[in-house]
Amino acid sequence: MKQLFQDRVTSLAITIVLLCIVASVVFPQQFPTFGNFSQVLLNLSIDTIVAVGMMLLLISGAFDLSVGSVVAFSGGLAAHLMFFQNVPVPLAILAGLLSAVLVGLINGYLIAYQGINPMIQTLAMMGIVRGGALMVSGAGIQNLPYWFNAIGQAKLLGIQMPVWYMLLTVAAFSFLVNKTVFFRRYYYIGGNEKAADLSGIRVRRMKLYVFVLSATLAGVAGILLTSRLGAAMSTLGRGLELRVITAVILGGASLTGGVGKIPGALMGALFMGLVANIMVIARVSGYWQEIILGIILIGAVWIDLVVQRRTKAK
């Protein structure tokens, strides 16, 4: 039993089940319904896709504060090209994704090869890309092509497609991280970067790749969010980076690197989504919702510190 609760993913899953039971008892008419659960999953689908990339970054010992801006810019660029330039939907989507790849390349190169601190670099990039999102989206772009909107608004088994994309992303990267040597290297890099370099792992190149991957997943999330809403707005993704970092730390990642599981990204995002949903049902003020989410972030970091101290003590 002790080992069961030492697994952060398992203990978080148990916490989520208990939270659902309590919420179902307190709000029997609103909470335990198919419509509510499907809406919760839809709301957290974008965060989870970004969280998968952030989990890989934290495993490698880094993080990215620009992902929220990339979400807004990639979707905004695609929408701008479709609406104002009459670019075909596939090419517009490709342009949006390539813009995200470019952001990842710049972040990865300057951090891995030029030694810029990840917080400083990605914080600066967050402002630059957010400005770009404002330029391409302006006050907002609506009336996007039907086939573009269908990507995020179509349903399968009564559930909107972003949820299925989220589950596919989590399943795919769970397999890759568990079964491929390439992705397992990130644990060695995050655990001891110097030792990984001496063992023959091309650390700088691997760090470049993971920043590109994280930004690309943020680009995918941006395309899906814009498609789901049927509109592009420069404000999309604001605060997303902090929610995602909170989710992955709750899901078992560590700020010191070297630990974490991809399903933990989903569990952390699910916990955050359920808490937000319960607060809405309980009609908690939006001001208090921000305060509570901030407390959860502090609590997640505190839990991480406690776990690290106990690990070192052993």
Image (tube, rainbow, N blue to C red):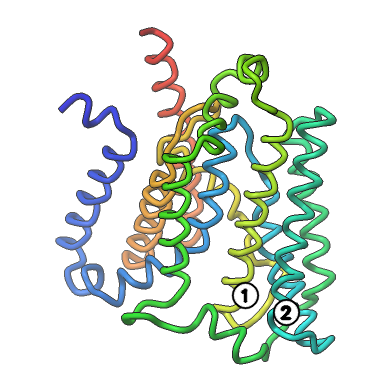
Question: Is residue 245 toward the left or the right of residue 14 in the image?
Answer: right
Residue at 21% x, 31% y: name it: 4
At label 1, counting other C-alpha atoms closer than 10 Å, the crowd grade (few under 14, some 14-19, many 20 or more) is: many
Q: Residue at x 52, y 50 (%)?
A: 51
Asked if 69 appears above or below 188 in the picture, the reply is below
Q: Secondary structure at mark 1?
A: helix
Q: Is residue 161 left or right of residue 115?
A: left
Q: Position of residue 72 (x, y in %)?
A: 69, 65
Q: CA distance from mark 1 to mark 2?
A: 8 Å
Residue at figure coordinates x 72%, y 71% from the top left = 94
> Amino acid type of disc 1?
Thr
- Give the residue number, with chain letter if any, for mark 1: 226
Specify the quadrant of the image occupied by residue 116.
top right
Q: Amino acid at mark 2?
A: Ala
Name the disc covering residue 155, or none. Answer: none
Comparing 297 with 92, the one in front is 92
Measuring from the top left, give residue 59's x and y in whole percent.
53, 33
